[in-house]
């Protein structure tokens, strides 16, 4: 049991950060699915347009949550810079989602609401989320200068800033 406890202590900050990231992502995901399906079912928008608009609205929700809850301990490099990079990185994530919908519709010939949900809101969001987490930590919300990260690995994070003290 001691090795497990030691491993948890070593990576506690990362586990808590991932839990916060997942929580914000879950809320944004619900917003994504609700708005996308609203655009498709109520407004009868084309698959790609509905997916893009739903992703854009969920990005706004995600930015607020990640900036103020997932990564509050990271350097504040300016709202304009963070917002711009966040939307660029989310643009890449959205392109991943749209590519999945495009492949489903135009390559595989699946153009139903169920197929669009599977390709865009499940596969696309999953792949995009992996890219988003990595890019947020790397570029959008960088580590504060003067922390343990100056050239060290990610495991050198000293403590969980939200749960410490």
Image (cartoon, rainbow, N blue to C red):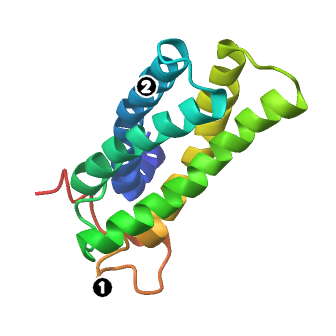
Quadrant housing residue 13: bottom left
Q: Nearer the viewer, residue 95 or 43?
A: 43
Q: Is residue 155 above or below residue 78?
A: above
Badge 2: residue crowd in 10 Å (few <14, some 14–19, many ≥20): many
Quadrant housing residue 120: top right
x and y, in percent, of residue 7 in the image: 45, 51
Q: Which residue is mark 2?
A: 35
Q: Residue at x 73, y 43 (%)?
A: 99
Q: Residue at x 72, y 14 (%)?
A: 112
Q: Nearer the viewer, residue 1 or 42?
A: 42
Classify the position of the N terminus by image quarter.
Answer: top left
Q: Residue at x 25, y 69 (%)?
A: 79
x and y, in percent, of residue 164 in the image: 17, 56
x and y, in percent, of residue 8 in the image: 40, 48
Which secondary structure, mark 2? helix
Q: Nearer the viewer, residue 5 or 142?
A: 142
x and y, in percent, of residue 3 in the image: 47, 48
What is the total number of numbered labels drawn onto the structure image?
Answer: 2
Q: Which residue is mark 1?
A: 145
Q: Is residue 123 above or below residue 81?
A: above
Q: Residue at x 55, y 45 (%)?
A: 129
Q: Is residue 80 left or right of residue 42?
A: left
């Amino acid at each position: 049991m001691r090795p497990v406890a030691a491993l948890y202590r070593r990576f506690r900050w990362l586990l808590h950060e991932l839990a916060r990231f997942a929580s914000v992502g879950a809320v944004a995901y619900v917003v994504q699915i609700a708005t996308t399906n609203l655009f498709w079912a109520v407004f009868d928008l084309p698959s790609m347009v509905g997916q893009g608009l739903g992703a854009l609205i969920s990005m706004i929700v995600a930015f607020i949550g990640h900036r103020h809850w997932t990564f509050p301990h990271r350097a504040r490099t300016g709202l304009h810079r963070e917002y711009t990079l966040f939307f660029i990185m989310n643009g890449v994530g959205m392109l991943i989602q749209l590519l999945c919908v495009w492949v489903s519709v135009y390559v595989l010939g699946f153009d139903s609401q169920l197929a669009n949900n599977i390709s865009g809101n499940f596969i696309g969001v999953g792949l995009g989320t992996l890219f988003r987490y990595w890019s947020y930590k790397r570029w959008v919300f960088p580590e504060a200068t003067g922390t343990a990260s100056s050239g060290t690995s990610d495991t050198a994070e000293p403590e969980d800033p939200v749960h410490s003290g």
